[in-house]
Amino acid sequence: VKDEPVSPVAESGATDFGPFDSRIWFNCAHQGPLPNVAVTALREALTWKIAPYRIKDEMFSSTPQRLKTLLGKLIGVPGDQIILGNSASYGLHILANGIRWKSGDEVLLVEGDFPASIFPWLNLRNNRGVLVRSIKPHRAVLQDWELEAAVTPATKLFCATWVDSFTGHVIDLSALGEICRAKNILFVVNASQGLGARELNVGKIKLDALTSCGYKWLCGPYGTGFCWIRPALRDSLSPCQSYWFPAVWGRNPGAMRDWVIPEGLGAAAYDVFCTANFFNFVPWGAAIEYWLSKGIPRIQSHNDALAQRLIGGLDPKKYTLFSPEAGSERSAIVVLSHSHSSLNHGIRAKLAEAGIDLSLRENNLRFSLHFFNTYQEVDYALAVLNAA
Ligand SMILES: Cc1ncc(COP(=O)(O)O)c(C=O)c1O
C-alpha cells in the first residue's frame, strides 16, 4: 500500500490517524483508532497526572463541559442536555431503571438486535412486571408499518439500533419516529454504529432518547459513551443515582457537609461518576472536535464511496453480500460471505496475513470503512478477496 492516500473526497483523513504498523484497519465497528489530535490531547492529560499540581480545580468541571458542548453540536442539542457515560449501555440503563413503569407496560424491541439494545430491558420483566416483546422484521430492516402493527395499548417504549452491527443495515429513524409519536410511545435509539460516520440531528427526528458508545466510529478511547434524553422525559424519571460531585462541588463547594440534593441538576444528575475522566474524556473531546471540523456529511460521502467501491469490485461468483447494495439502508459496514461460507475463516486469516484487519461476525466478513481508509486500501483488499 502506497503512502499517498487516494480518496473519493478531496482530502481523506489517512494522515490524521495511525500509523497502523503498515496494516489496514477496516474494523471501526469493533474499535475506532484515536486520531492524532486525540493522541496529542491524551499525552497532555498524562502530564497532568504525572504532576497533579497541573490539575486545577476548574478542570473537573471544564473537561466534562467541553465534551458535552462538542457532543451536543454533533447531534444538534445544547451541551447541557448531554449525559456523559462509559458505554452505550449506560444511557439505556438510566432509562430502564428510571422510567416509572406500571405493571403490564410493554417494551418493544427488534428480534436479532444487538444485545446492548436488548439486555437493559430484560430485568424489567422480573422486577417491574413489564412485558418485553420483540418484533421480527420480515426482511433485514424493520419497516414502519411493522412497528405500527406491533404496537398495543400497553406499549410504552420502542428501542432499536440505528445501524445493524451484523449486516450494516440502517433503519429509517424518521419513519419509525413518526409512528412512535403518533402512537404516543417513547422512541429510544442506540446510535453506536452510526454516530461519527453518518449525520443525525435530534431536532429532525421524533426521538425521545439516544445513546451511543464513543469508541467505535467516534474514535474515542474504550470506556466512553454518552446519551441524550429529551428533557421532559429526563425530568420525569425516578432518580436512580445521586452523585455528590454535581450536587455539591459543581454547585456550592462551600456546603460539602449539607446533605441536600439540589433541584434542577438536569442531565448532570445522570453523568457517569468521576465525570472529569481525564484520560478518556480529554482525547475523546479532541476526536469529536476533529469530526466536527471535517463535517459529518463529508465523512459520510467518503465512507459511502468506499463502500460502493468494495461492493462493486467483489467477484459476484465468489461472494454474497449481506449488506444493502446501495441506497439509504446502506452504511459504512459492509458484510459479505464467500459462497462457501466455511471458507470465511480462512479468508479472514489470509486478509490478516496480507495486513488487513477486519471482523468475522456470525461467520461473515465484516468490513468497516471510515474516513482514514482509502480507495487504494479497498482495492488491495479486493485483490486478496477475489484471489481467495
Ligand atoms: C450496536 C452496538 N451497540 C452497542 C455496542 C457496545 O455496547 P457498550 O458500549 O454498552 O458495551 C456495540 C458493540 O459492538 C454495538 O455494536
Image (cartoon, rainbow, N blue to C red):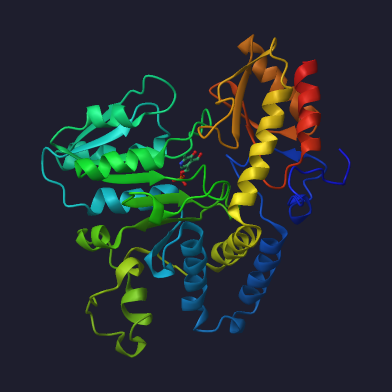
Quarter of the image where one finds residue 333: top right
Instruction: Reply above or below: 132 against 63.
Output: above
Residue drawn at x 67%, y 74% as measured from the top left: 47
Instruction: Reply above or below: 178 against 322.
Output: below
Task: Find residue 59 and report its horizontal and vertical position in percent.
Answer: 52, 79
Quarter of the image where one finds residue 251: bottom left
Assign the C terminus to one quadrant of the image: top right
Q: Nearer the viewer, residue 234 or 74?
A: 74
> In the image as oriented, which residue stretches furthest toward the left?
103
Task: Find residue 198 and report its horizontal and vertical position in percent.
Answer: 55, 46
Assign the N terminus to one quadrant of the image: top right
Instruction: Reply above or below: 387 against 11.
Output: above
In the image, is 12 to the left or to the right of 91? right
Residue drawn at x 29%, y 88% as measured from the top left: 255
Task: Find residue 162 and report its horizontal and vertical position in percent.
Answer: 44, 40
Quarter of the image where one finds residue 161: top left
> In the image as oriented, which residue stretches furthest toward the bottom?
254
Q: Tell me if residue 2 can be seen.
A: yes
Instruction: Reply above or below: 152 against 298.
Output: above
Q: Nearer the viewer, residue 388 or 47?
A: 388
Residue drawn at x 48%, y 35% as measured from the top left: 170
Residue drawn at x 58%, y 60% as measured from the top left: 288
